[in-house]
Image (tube, rainbow, N blue to C red):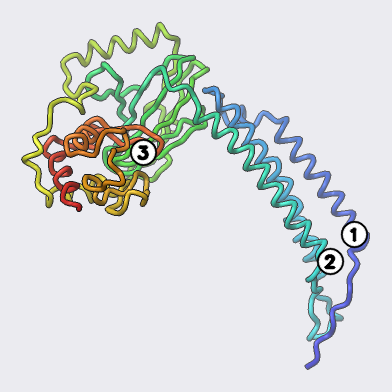
């Protein structure tokens, strides 16, 4: 069987007509995304300073994505019709062959590449604005549970069930989990972060709008995951942003209410650890449970989240810990008690990690055994 040779095919008048139609539709889509009150329709108020920047990025992606979709999907439909198989075509007919067209290959490579570069630049600029939020102000710890949230505030004993924030004051929100992986999301803030057992992640923001904003868990965390959504069930937990006077009154009320509750912050650094009671075997089992998500038993340069810990107490090339203290058993114990936040992230303290003094002694014994 001899195949027919593909003949050069001109795009024709129909192609340029549909191109003009697609161009009008694409411009209309872009105008729609930049003029329609989409976030008002979705009931998404701008609750923090950087939320408007996230909206700008989302609008840019929706607008350009819609325009791109119109052309791509439109041309698929047009070409499927314009170059469909005809009844008059011979059985061995082949479709239009397009290859070695250097101009076409150049443009379909350059245009997407430029789009990705622009999107990357805009995204990184907004990400830096979020990450460089002021670090002073209110500090809150949110803990995910199956299936609710609890919160800790400095100078308020124990965990409480409400999250209140003063408007206009920078907030540092530390996130962790007591059981499984959760994900903390406040739609009005446009910020979301995972809550991982044994790990503390941090987000920073400054509330600018007074009101009640729903908290949503966006990570499947068990059979009742859907109940951790105040947008679905208004009886669930909300973030309350209020004026400073109202916040101070609420804060003082919880101080009085929980005056006799144990587990006040900070409790992780209380008391010296008796390292003589530690056993390496127990520490190895505990390391696998509490530490292996962030550290490997490998050279210092082997970074998972934190550095490798092989020979951490015996490696002359790395004489100091991440906090700058000399790598000694006593200093490792202090680091495990107090935790640390640095360029690699946040290492949870003993309270957050659920470590007793005996656990710390066991971990130090295990690390000391790694020559």
Which residue lies under the disc numbered 2?
82
Ranked by sequence position, the earlier of labels 1 and 3 is 1
Frontmost residue, 354 versus 330? 330
Single out the residue that lies furthest toward the left.
277
| Residue 195: numbered disc | 3
Ranked by sequence position, the earlier of labels 1 and 2 is 1
Which residue lies under the disc numbered 1?
14
Q: CB under 8 Å between callouts 1 and 2?
A: yes
Q: Position of residue 4 (x, y in %)?
A: 84, 85
Single out the residue that lies furthest toward the bottom.
1
Q: Residue at 73% x, 35% y: name it.
A: 32
Q: Secondary structure at mark 1?
A: helix
Q: Residue at 24% x, 39% y: name it.
A: 327
The image quadrant that residue 97 belongs to is bottom right
The image quadrant that residue 185 belongs to is top left
Q: Position of residue 361 (x, y in %)?
A: 13, 40
């Amino acid at each position: 069987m001899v195949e027919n040779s593909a003949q050069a095919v001109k795009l024709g008048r129909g192609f340029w007509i549909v191109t003009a139609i697609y161009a009008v539709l694409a411009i209309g889509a872009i105008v729609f995304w930049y003029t329609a009150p989409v976030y008002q329709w979705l009931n998404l108020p701008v609750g923090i300073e950087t939320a408007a920047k996230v909206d700008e990025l989302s609008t840019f992606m929706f607008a350009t994505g819609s325009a791109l979709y119109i052309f791509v999907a439109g041309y698929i439909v047009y070409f499927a019709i314009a170059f469909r198989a005809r009844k008059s075509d011979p059985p061995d007919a082949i479709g239009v062959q397009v290859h070695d067209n250097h101009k076409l290959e150049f443009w379909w490579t350059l245009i997407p590449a430029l789009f990705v570069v622009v999107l990357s630049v805009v995204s990184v600029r907004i990400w830096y604005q979020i990450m460089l939020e002021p670090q002073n102000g209110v500090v809150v710890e949110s803990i995910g549970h199956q299936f609710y949230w609890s919160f800790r505030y400095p100078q308020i004993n124990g965990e409480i069930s409400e999250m209140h924030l003063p408007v206009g004051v920078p907030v540092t929100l530390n996130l962790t989990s007591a059981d499984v992986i959760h994900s903390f999301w406040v739609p009005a803030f446009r910020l979301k972060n995972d809550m991982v057992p044994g790990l503390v992640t941090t987000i920073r923001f400054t509330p600018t709008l007074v009101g009640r904003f729903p908290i949503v868990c966006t990570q499947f965390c068990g059979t009742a995951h859907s109940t951790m959504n105040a947008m679905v069930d208004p009886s669930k937990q909300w973030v309350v942003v209020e004026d400073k006077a109202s916040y101070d009154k609420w804060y003082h009320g919880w101080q009085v209410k929980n005056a006799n509750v144990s587990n006040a912050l900070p409790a992780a650094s209380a008391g010296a650890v008796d390292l003589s009671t530690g056993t390496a075997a127990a520490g190895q089992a505990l390391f696998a449970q509490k530490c292996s998500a962030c550290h490997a038993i490998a050279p210092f340069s082997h970074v998972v989240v934190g550095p490798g810990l092989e020979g951490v107490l015996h490696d002359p090339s790395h004489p100091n810990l991440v906090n700058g203290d000399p790598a000694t058993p006593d200093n490792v114990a202090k680091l495990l008690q107090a935790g640390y936040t640095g360029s690699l992230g946040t290492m949870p303290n003993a309270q957050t990690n659920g470590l007793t003094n005996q656990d710390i002694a066991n971990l130090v014994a295990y690390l000391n055994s790694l020559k």
